[in-house]
Image (cartoon, rainbow, N blue to C red):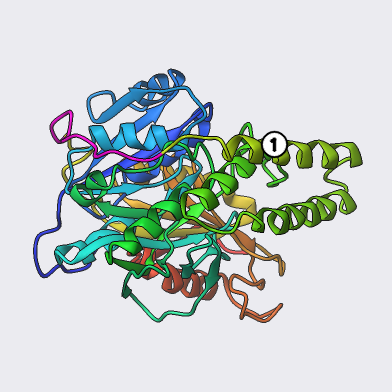
Amino acid sequence: MTAPAAQTPHPAVSVVIVSRHRPRELRRCLTALRFQSLPRFEVVVVADPAAVEVIAELGLSEQVKHASYDLPNISQARNIGIGLAAGDVVAFIDDDAVAEPVWLERLIVPFQEPILSAAGGFVLGRNGIDLQWGAEMVGPDGDSRLIEISGETRREGTPEGGFKTHGTNCAFRRDRLCQMGGFDEAYRFFLDETDLNLRMAQRGYVTALIPDAVVQHGFAPSIRRRADRVPLSLFEVGASQAYFLRRHDRDLDRLGMIREDHRRSLLTHMISGGLEPQMVRKLLSDFDDGVADGLQRQGGTTPLPPPLAPFLAFKDQPPGYSIAVYAPRRQQRDLFAAAKKEADQGAIVTAMSFSRSSLFHHRWFHPDGFWVQTGGLFGKSLRSDPYFRRYSLAERAERERALLARSRLCDEAKGFGTF
């Protein structure tokens, strides 16, 4: 396996994960971080007490910093994580996300240049293939718009805005983040990263967007939304919207337009059968109550202290090698057993299980420590693919291995069985 070359040593980096009542997702996120190509970094988990059990069960009690926190305020939890982080750069990933093996190394490469203050990567959706969030600009009203970039792109912020980073895939230079007071804890949920992006832009800080720094994000259920992204409450959304406009001296009349956008979205869910009519009314009432709260909410930031604990290496060496193993769908059990064996030896493994069909493909991370790609031998794995293309088993595996080589450092494909 050949890791991307660096011109100068990487800065020390801390990865902060905030988790609340999602032990299964946290376990998967931590397991995937074992396979990062970056040889040395630390992990900080800020989570409810049950997370301690997850960390212990994974044998990571001596390798992961942990702070117990069980309140529904992601900004406060992230600030606790920043306080424990001893790296020069602090990266964030959500507990319901899985990082590709080269994610962290690519995300922090631009920080070798002192001018850089922040960086963000791209986010894939639930199927592990389609883009969930790409390159975006954010303006002073908090609205974001998609932009096209080619490769790593940097931009200096202005009072009119700058690059938007996403909380599940971003990094910041610790000293500048602390000088700014980290995240404004009045944003208990929603617009917390947007607010930080704008405050950094107003200072003229430089942000980089790196398309090759990729995580897959699954949208796990929470107290605020279902797994299908149907909201369960809009209170904090309304509160954050109102507080944001107030904090940044924007026109509060925009709240009416924002409410209408939410109403249309809720009606779409209702028409598709995802919401009952009475739930639409309740959610809009939640939003209105949140707005009233946000208009009165007190917030702001103060500088954060130096690290509260010394650097604690999560691991001290990269994975030994990267391999793809493949087999027909009927041999999936044997395929997964072989993949687990390789992963237990420290390899980055992708197990490809193909049915003799034209089913679309799906990529995901197995809790046993390897990546999986399922789908039809003749089916689409990219949007640009035709609906049907004939392949042999080995041809299809080699094609997919080549597609994954940049994000998985995958050098070899090994087959099990034939159709």
Inspect this view and state whether residue 27 appears. Answer: no
Q: Residue at x 47, y 37 (%)?
A: 186
Q: Residue at x 72, y 40 (%)?
A: 288
- Position of the N terminus, as image quadrant, is bottom left
Question: Which residue is nearer to you in this view: 398 or 150?
Answer: 150
Q: Which residue is mark 1?
A: 233
Is residue 61 found inside the magenta-colored segment of the image?
A: no
Q: How far from the left and from the top, in percent, is residue 192?
A: 46, 47
Q: Residue at x 41, y 61 (%)?
A: 214
Find numbered disc 1 in the image and state the secondary structure of the residue it sits on. Answer: loop
The amino acid on which the numbered mark 1 sits, given as a three-letter code, is Ser
Neighbour tally class for label 1: few under 14, some 14-19, many 20 plus, Cα within 10 Å: some
**Count of numbered labels shown in the rendering:** 1
Q: Which residues are magenta?
A: 300-311
Left or right: where does residue 92 sit relative to residue 415?
Answer: left
Q: How far from the left and from the top, in percent, is residue 378?
A: 66, 73
